[in-house]
Structure formats: structure tokens, C-alpha cells
Amino acid sequence: MTTEMLDAHKPEDIRRAGELIKKGGLVVIPTETVYGLAANALDEDAVRSIYKAKGRPSDNPLIVHISRLSQLGALVREIPESAVRLAEHFWPGPLTIILPKSALISSVVSGGLDTVAVRLPASETARAIIDAAGCPLAAPSANTSGKPSPSRFSHVWEDLTGRVEAMVDGGHCAVGVESTVVSLTGKVPKLLRPGGVTARQLEEVLGHVELDEAVLQGLSQDVQVASPGMKYKHYSPKANVVIVDASPREYIKYVNAQVDVHALCFEEDVQYLRGPCVTYGSRYDGAAQARQLFDALHALDKCNAKTVYARIPSKNGIGLAVYNRLVRAAGFEIVNPYQHYIIGLTGGSGSGKTTVAKAMEELGCAAIDCDKISRSPNVYDEDCLRELSEYFGSDVVEDGVLNRRLLAQRAFQTTAGKEALNAITHPRILKHVQLAIEKALKSGKRLVVIDAPTLFESGFDAACARIIAVTAPREMRLARIARRDSLTPEQAEKRLGAQQEDSFYTGRADHIVSGEGDYDLEKRLLPIITGLSEKAR
Ligand code: TXA
Ligand code: MG
């Protein structure tokens, strides 16, 4: 079969795509998540040809795509209130909702299940094609079964040419990973596949949402899974992918020590890696990681990579979707080369870091207080004092003793002063933090918590395999720092005003822990700590 190439920007091409689908044909369409392999969802033969073109097992059901909410009613037996709320919040968008199917949906679409997956995509091209076809579209991701999903037109072009009637070029998909799949068929909503709509966003609308166990783990073929797609080999590039669970620095050290491997890493890592690498976004930009992951997997195929060592993504926010795809691409192979975890603990003043660090210590971690180290005499050795007096004036050191008040006065007057102070003291502080970590590891601790208010600013986050952000309401933080440092409300307000927003910390963290009080703290920390100590063994 010859495959027609169509352009998403041409109205006549959209009409052509609609016509071909109406006639029972297969057309690759762009969506905001990944490209889809679409056919008329109400035409059994057309739907069968999807399974054939993809080489997909027939018990793995398809998503039905609609262009208007009013089309949902005919496809399902009932629309629960929770579905209405989800649709209001996230449709059109990267969310698929599973509901009991109506008789209109054939068991070929539902893979023999009594339920149907429905999605109203944000992509205007996708909706225009649905309208042009005049029917709902069954569409799985447009990749041959087992391969990484296509987030660029070139991916489908190389994979499916000659097996479909047409392909519509809509450029690079904005989200880059497939939709979030949530089932509303049980008592509690269940997240079956993480995607562009995050677990937290779902919980804000639905209350508690269960995480299907297949999201994070490999399941054996004979286990009954809620989402059949989860049991199949997935997203696999040709190379053998291994995830390295370590800090950024340790990852680089580990990968540089291997021969004949490719790195699948974050942008920040490239400058330190000696061998070939393919990047998938910035360490702190989950959305960019999602957008680029499948492209990166395709690129590794292109350069014939045999063994790939991948940086572990955070499971926070959209990171959970990235992790879920990558861990499948790796066939669940994760290595822990260093058998310990350095955990960075950070957050604004008065958020409760110290309390959290204490609680972690009680749960068996070693805890290192960077503020305390930054004031310790060890840091201010002879060399350090000399550099300080050279820059800030000889009177900041009197008889070998640092006049902290005078130093602070001079240093904090100007940005240049602050920078100079940091340039002199930071490397020394970091050296002593590093020594404290080594001491803790030598003593047999596997989990070491670094309480560091300026974890990111100092660059020490590169030594941390996990990061916990501690947050508390602003009013509480103001009251705490006023009390602790004997400040007036105005002074406290000014201090907080000079600090980073909460989102600076939470957006970069693996875990967010509330520092509001010690109530429940242990219960919230325990799963994090237990998970890590199991891995560190
Ligand atoms: O973003 C997306 O969802 C893309 C675009 C094209 O819309 N589509 C997509 O389809 O990813 P597919 O077929 O690759 O993945 C659909 C997933 C599979 O894991 C499948 O098992 C699950 O949804 N699924 C479909 N119907 C289901 C049902 N009735 N119950 C449980 N899981 C279902
Ligand atoms: Mg798929």
C-alpha cells in the first residue's frame, strides 16, 4: 500500500484524512501526547486492521477519541459525577477515562473487557480529523508493538510507511508521553498509567486516587492487570537500557568508567561525560524530559547504541510518567552502584527542615547540618581568614578571631560582597560537608541526610541521589523565624521576601514533605526511607 503524506495545516488534508477513515482506512494522526494510529471506532473491521498494522495482542484494548463532550454519552453506560468533574478540569487534554462501555463499543475495541477508555484530545488537528471523519476514533500510539511511542513525525514515517493509508504531519508532540489513564470503574479512582495530567492534579479533583501497582513495578505475564497494556514489553529501543540510581556526580563517575556505552542523561550531565550521550531534558524540567524521552530512545536506535546507561528521573509530578516509561524501556533493570543514598533536604527559612532532619535521624539516617558546618571554626582556618581580611578589610579579623558582625555588615551590603563571601567560604564548607558524609558512610550509615538551605545555589544538589523539599505555610514560617531569630514582623517579612518561592524547591525535589509540625511526620517519612534502605542493601 502506498501511504499518503498529509499536512496538519491544510484544511483539504484534514478532510482527506477524514474521508479515508470514513471508508474504513487507517490514518496516523498527531495528538498533543504522541501520534495515534486511528480508525473508525464503530467499524469492527477497521479496528481489527489497527491491531494487525501494529502487531498488537488482541487483548490489549484501544482508546476511543472524541472531539466533544456530548459524544461521550453514547459510548458508555453511565457518566458518573467524578467523570464529569475530570472532563471539566482536564478535557480537552492528555487524560483518558475508563468507564463501563455501552453496546455501541465492540469487544474488538475493548479487548474483550466490559469497559472502554475515552479521551478528548487537546490537539486541534486531532479534533478536526474526528469531526471530518464524523465518528469517534479508536487509536493506540502509532508504533509497532513493543517499540517506543512516536512523538515526532519522522518516528512514524520510518516505522509505519506502507502499512497505513495516510499519515498527517503535525510536528513534534507537545507533551511527548501518552495520556494519563484513570479508571472510574471501581470504588476508588485508580491511576493505571501516569501521563501529562499528574497524580496530584487528579487528587485535587477526585480526592484519593489509588496508584496501580503496575505503574512502578514489572509484573509477570500471568498476573491479572487492570490495564492490559502494562504487562507487555514496552518502549524498548534496540539497545540494552540500564537505569543508574545514584547522584548526578556518581552517575558520571560510573558511566565514565565503562567502555562502549551510551549515556541517556540530562543536559546538565553532558559536559562531564567522556563517551557518547543522548539527552532527555534538564534535570529539573520534568515536562521537557517527557517531551524528549521517546525522541531520545529513537535517537539511540539510530546511532546503534548497544548498552545504554540512563539517568534516573524523579517520580514527582510528570516525572512519574517519565519514570514509568523509562523503567519499561529498561525492562526494569536498575543498578545501584554505590549502595548508599545522599539525600538533600532543603526549603525556605522556617519551613521545618531541622525537625524533618531530626525525624530522619531517628529513623536511622545520618544527618548533617550544613548551617552548623558553615559556622564551625574548621571552615575558618588561617587561609580562609587571610582571604576574608584581604577582601573585606584587615579589621574583620582581630588577633586571629573573626568579627562576624563586621564581616556580615560589609558582605551583605552589595551583591558583589555576598558573592565574594560565598566564593571564599562555599568551597570550604562543601569540603567539610563532604568529609562529614564520608565519615557517616565509613561508620556504616547507608542513608545520609544533608540539611542544606542553599542546596541548589551551592551546587551541592549534584551530590544528592534524592532531594526532599520541606514546605510550610508562609504565616507559620514568619512566626517561626521571628521567634527563633528575635525579629520584628517587618524584619521577618523582609527576610522571607528575599528568599526563593516554594515552587523553586518543590519543582526540583523528588519528595515534598510538610514541615508544619511533627504530627504524622514519621508516617510520611517512613515509606521514603524504607524504600531507599531496601535499595541500598
Ligand atoms: O496519549 C494517548 O493515550 C495515545 C494517543 C494516541 O491518544 N494513545 C495511546 O494508546 O497511548 P495505547 O493503545 O498505546 O495505550 C492505551 C492504554 C493501554 O495501556 C491499554 O491497555 C489501556 O490504555 N486501556 C485501554 N482501554 C482500557 C480499558 N478498557 N481498561 C483498562 N485499560 C485500558
Ligand atoms: Mg502504546
Image (cartoon, rainbow, N blue to C red):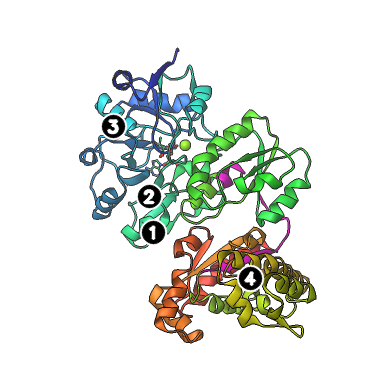
Confirm if mark 1 falls within 8 A of ligand 1. no
Quadrant position of the N terminus in the picture: top left
Residue situated in front as seen by the camera: 233 or 104: 233
Look at the image and tell me in which quarter the C terminus lies.
bottom right
Q: Which residues are magenta?
A: 326-347
Kind of residue at badge 3:
Pro
Instruction: Check disc 4: other Cα within 10 Å, few if <14, some if 14-19, many if 20+.
Output: many
Tell me the residue that label 1 is attached to: 209
Q: Residue at x 55, y 66 (%)?
A: 468
Q: Amino acid at mark 1?
A: Val
| Figure quadrant of residue 140 | top left
Alpha-carbon span between mark 3 and mark 1: 28 Å
Which tag is nearer the camera, tag 2 or tag 4? 4
Q: Which mark is residue 136?
A: 3
Query: From what the image shows, is residue 68 above or below residue 225?
Result: above
Q: Which mark is residue 182?
A: 2
- Asked whether disc 1 touches disc 2, contact meaning CB atoms under 8 Å apart, the reply is yes
In percent of the image, x 23 and y 47: which residue is there?
78
Residue type beneath disc 2: Val
Q: Is residue 265 magenta?
A: no
According to the image, label 4 marks what residue?
Answer: 449
- Circle nearer the N terminus (2, 4): 2
Tell me the distance, in whole angstroms, between the alpha carbons under discs 2 and 3: 19 Å
**First along the sequence among labels 1 and 2:** 2
Whichever of callouts 3 and 1 sits on the residue coming sooner in the sequence is 3
